[in-house]
Amino acid sequence: MARWSPIERNLRAIHGPVLAGVDEVGRGPLAGPVVACALVMPADQRAIAGVNDSKQLTPEVRRALALRIRERATAIGLGAASVREIDQLNIYHATVLAMQRALRQLERRLGQTPHHVLVDGKSLRTLGHVHTAVVKGDSKCYGIACASIVAKVTRDRLMHTLALRYPVYAWERNAGYGTAVHREALAQHGLTAHHRRSFCLDEQPSLF
């Protein structure tokens, strides 16, 4: 992604230069929180070379880009919803909650409300911010792609830390997703406090 998208340029022209990009990671795993990032990249600077949908990048490239994004961003907010909140609310509402928390932190660090918010995916009725939603926005819009990279690196680091306490699940490699190794460990060792019970019921009904 070599430049700001026409979508972003048009939104800044209409609403103002402080455009927040928002994305989340971790909707699908069996373990760990869902993590969201909201950030504002300076409108007067060129896009960072190599920024793209975080899923299309290697871990090494993601980590390097996340450092550059953090150095350049006007402000960054991070938010998460816990495993308990995912089980209580469902993953959709927990994802919205994580985004709301990221936006609140962003606003505190900015000292203002963004002029407009750009989110990946479909419109979110309960987000609480006027926003534009772009399906596959993490591969189309620079600000969303930056948010996806920071969110992904943040969540991966958390799962690496948890893997030190629960090594049999190989979270340092699968980030909590339902790989064969992870499912086998679930069958042999059962659930931890970091597993989403509502997700694992479908994967391993014998655990309940």
Image: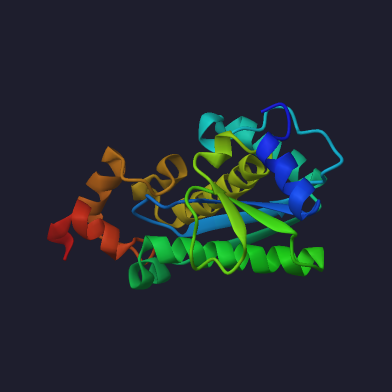
Residue at the outermost front position? 14
Side of 82 where 196 appears, left or right = left
Q: Nearer the viewer, residue 9 or 190?
A: 9
Q: Position of residue 79 (x, y in %)?
A: 59, 63
Look at 39% across and 66% down and name the residue there: 86
Look at 72% across and 42% down and name the residue there: 10
Q: Position of residue 12 (x, y in %)?
A: 76, 48
Side of 102 where 156 appears, left or right = left
Side of 14 where 133 appears, left or right = left
Look at 66% across and 42% down and name the residue there: 146
Count of all numbered marks drawn on residues in the image: 0
Q: Quadrant of the C terminus?
A: bottom left
Q: Position of residue 193 (x, y in %)?
A: 36, 67
Seen in the picture, residue 100 relative to 25 is either above or below; the reply is below
Q: Nearer the viewer, residue 147 or 139?
A: 139
Quadrant of the rendered image containing residue 58: top right
Q: Position of residue 206 (x, y in %)?
A: 12, 59
Does residue 53 appear in the picture of this structure? no
Q: Quadrant of the N terminus?
A: top right
Residue at the outermost right position? 44
Q: Nearer the viewer, residue 57 or 42?
A: 42
Seen in the picture, residue 11 relative to 102 is either above or below; the reply is above
Does residue 199 appear in the picture of this structure? yes
Look at 42% across and 47% down and name the residue there: 171
